[in-house]
Image: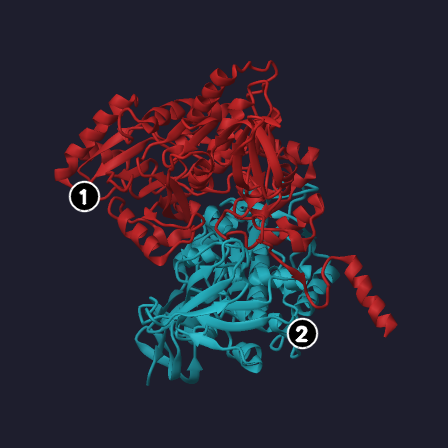
Chain colours: A red, B cyan
Amino acid sequence: MYDVIVIGAGVTGSAVARELSRYDISTCVLEKCEDVCEGTSKANSAIVHAGFDAAEGTLMAKLNVRGNEMMDELSRDLDIPFKRNGSMVVCIHKEALDGLKELYDRGIKNGVKGLKILSREEALKMEPNLSENVQGALYAPTGGIICPFELNIAMAENAFENGVDFKFNTEVKDIKKGEDDLWHLQTNSGEYTARYVVNAAGVYADMIHNMVSADKIKITPRRGDYCLLDKQVGGHVSHTIFPQPTNLGKGVLVSPTVHGNLIVGPTAIDIDDKEGTNTTAEGIDDLISKAGNHIRNLPIRNVITSFAGLRAHEEHHDFIIGEIADAPCFIDCAGIESPGLSASPAIGEMVGNILKEKMNLKEKENFKATRKGIVRTEGLSVAQMNDLIKKNPAYGNIICRCEMITEGEILDAIHRPLGAKSLDGVKRRTRAGMGRCQAGFCSPRTMEIINRELGIPYEKITKSGGESVIVPTRTKEGSGNSATSLEGTRGEVTGA
Amino acid sequence: MKNYDIVIVGGGPAGLAAAVSAKKAGCDSILILERDTELGGILNQCIHNGFGLHTFKEELTGPEYAYRFIKQVLDLGIEYKLGTMVMDIAPDKTVTAMNREDGMFTIPAKAVILAMGCRERPRGALNIPGYRPAGIFSAGTAQRLVNIEGYMPGKEVVILGSGDIGLIMARRMTFEGAKVKVVAELMPYSGGLKRNIVQCLDDYGIPLKLSHTVVDIEGKEHVTAVTIAEVGPDRKPIPGTEERYTCDTLLLSCGLIPENELSRSAGVEMNPVTSGPIVNESLETNIPGVFACGNVLHVHDLVDYVSEEAGRAGENAAKYVSGAEEAGATQGADGKSGAAQAEAGGDAEAGGAHVIALAATDGARYTVPSTINVDRMSDLLTVRFRVGDVYKNSFVSVYFDDERVMHNQKRIMSPGEMEQIVLRKAQLAERPLLKTITVKIENE
């Protein structure tokens, strides 16, 4: 029995778990995938929004601005890269200039600091690769860029180090309130019970909610296609560039990422399939044509990968956070679509406060707010590198040639709390495989390390858990690295 | 860390051949830096035969071919470091590298030979729509998994792209009991060698569909099916031509990209057509003393030509170093380094030298080299190029300025097979006013 069970180890669930780990209670996170950050949290714009977009008075507006404010301290505490590069909403039609003022006013009401409306000349001076047609822009200096994987992973790791349990490959199938007044959660790996449940199930939050409430909700997966461009062109713009928003969302942005790539996206296509993360040719074409409206000479041929993510869209377009009226002790975090990543620390704080009050929680004395990330060898001086290599020679061995990731970083990713178990797990923690060759070079080498360090046979190593095995069988000869299979072959020959 | 005259970046076929010739040309201070755990580069995973027909007049496997050069490197006592990644090449030829034993170290080289090879174009760069599950491999990665690690990516295979590695892997997967259902090629012609299409596809009844591409990948965790469609002249899929193949593996053999990150950061000028450095007759880049050879310079079909080209680069690097030493010995009193002297001397020389530009037009896509300094060229100089389309019974023509001096008919030329012409020094020396040599493809 746990005091609290959190369903979902995405950025929302992990933020909630971290907040709850401040208190003297038992908390467990149930995650249907094999790792944290496997759903909406892993495929988005990687932006910390300033907060001028959401309608005044909404939870979205409030938590976005609060989350944005929290990000400096949080990124320092959790040792993750975060940069306030500033964002710009670009107007390319004279008749739409009023729209910028509207956004500006909304931002002021939402409490966004430092907003400024720029003239065409000012905008072009700050961002020379804007379209010739730029008429003006709204500038938000508090806009930022972050690594969504690292934010999610760091919050989960920190929660784990402060005592929160994580159960992976554990999918909640049914939830009932028992006669013991506890929540009974049926999963594919047995029953869990808890006094309180937090629903942070992303695109599945409606299914979880609807298990316990008569007041049904519906989450529509809204697909967003993205293109990620090579670091060679990462400096094409330095700010996050948005078009003016429409009722379908904030439109196709072009932004540097915190690791120096250029990201272009997303589209907004409502679908039925909650796992429908396939890109389509139409989606990508649409993306490219739209991004070209605001950016001059977009270097789209430098694309290194395209992908799609799903936003958990709820029809009222606001976050649903709080105790369900007809299901006491069951807290929803539903409809967490953009700006969910930006708001996540604030969502965690809000849910933490709700439960603190309801459960009369006391803060632990030994809560540790900080977490040390994986040592990044990129950017270290020769002397620093040599210190590191002297202590652990694995830091002298480059595994990912594109991102220059060493074996030392991969070993750290595997052996740290809630460590990586798959190629994607290593990739999201270290960036090995995220570069221009897209893991062609490093994947066999990373598999060798996973095999050696975790004792997982090659045939069982996955891309990202489940059925995603990389090499399901041996070759006919059974050659390769395994001494035992060679022995077997020799035995047969002798026998014949 | 010891200093070396020549640092060779890469211990594959290009690096090995360059090292051997540099040594034979008299340079005793050579270091090969190789990132893998063995010398030989990609040849180590190319366990099929067909290598060495030109060089050794016999048919070898990739590892056998590599060993012919590795043995020479060992016999000649050429130094090398394995497991060593070159992190940076500075414009002044200071090479920064790193490995487990030595940590990060720098070598102020007198000459650098770029021999980093190439990499495969990944799925992402092709923007293939669909899911991103396990079961999608570039052909070379699959080749490594099968031939070195001893594991099979799957049992039912679709291959996109008809590059040579894809063709070889079609046969290799078939040998291992897998069913290769189709090879789809976006272009109306194959990017691979004719002999590989015959020996790897035709012999096993594997269909090659030209002007086809992948339009969808199914499977959320692992590939379950791939849909291909015919493309029109604009290379866009034609609606209604889709064919769905159930499969568990998609291999990609869609082109190779010279791996020039280090060259770019060193300030080496690039040819946008080859994605490799622009080089002169000595295979020297715009940075004096920095040479390039093999697939980092332009992607080859046959390793024999890589070895030949790399041999020239090695020899020229050795010459450069000894030239620098002589310059240093005769003029070193003012404290400048020998290499700097040689460069200064070289520039002065270039001022009065007869330098001819090479141009590729009308179906010829590029030439290597791009310029020829007649004084420095050897008696015979091989110029390599590729054509941009399939040409039947057409002529390779060479113009010295406006005068056509070569006009050779070829039964067939295709983008997948590298072409070459040979220029004679005597021929160029007798034309002191010659400015441009143009290679073009003519119908008659």
- Real-space Cα separation, disc 2 to disc 1, in angstroms: 61 Å
Q: Quadrant of residue B126?
A: bottom left
Give the quadrant of residue A183.
top right
- On the image, the x and y values in percent for residue A353 come to 46, 19
Label of residue B407 in the image? none
- Image position of A310 (left or right of A298): right
Residue B399 showing in the rendered view: yes
Question: Which amino acid is tagged 1?
Answer: Asn
Tags 2 and 1 both on a single chain:
no
Above or below, A8 against A464 in this view is: above
Image quadrant in which you'd find residue B115 = bottom right
Estimate the x, y position of residue A269 in percent, counting from the top left. Answer: 33, 49
Question: In front here: B364 or B248?
Answer: B248
Q: Which residue is mark 1?
A: A133
Q: Which residue is mark 2?
A: B60
State how many labels appear: 2
How far across and down, in percent of the image, does residue A233 sit? 38, 46
* Quadrant holding the N terminus of chain B: top right
Q: What is the secondary structure assignment of the residue under circle 1?
A: loop
| Mark 2 surroundings within 10 Å by alpha-carbon count, few (fewer than 14), some (14 through 19), many (20 or more) | some
Residue B144 in the image: x percent, y percent? 62, 61
Chain ID of residue with mark 2: B
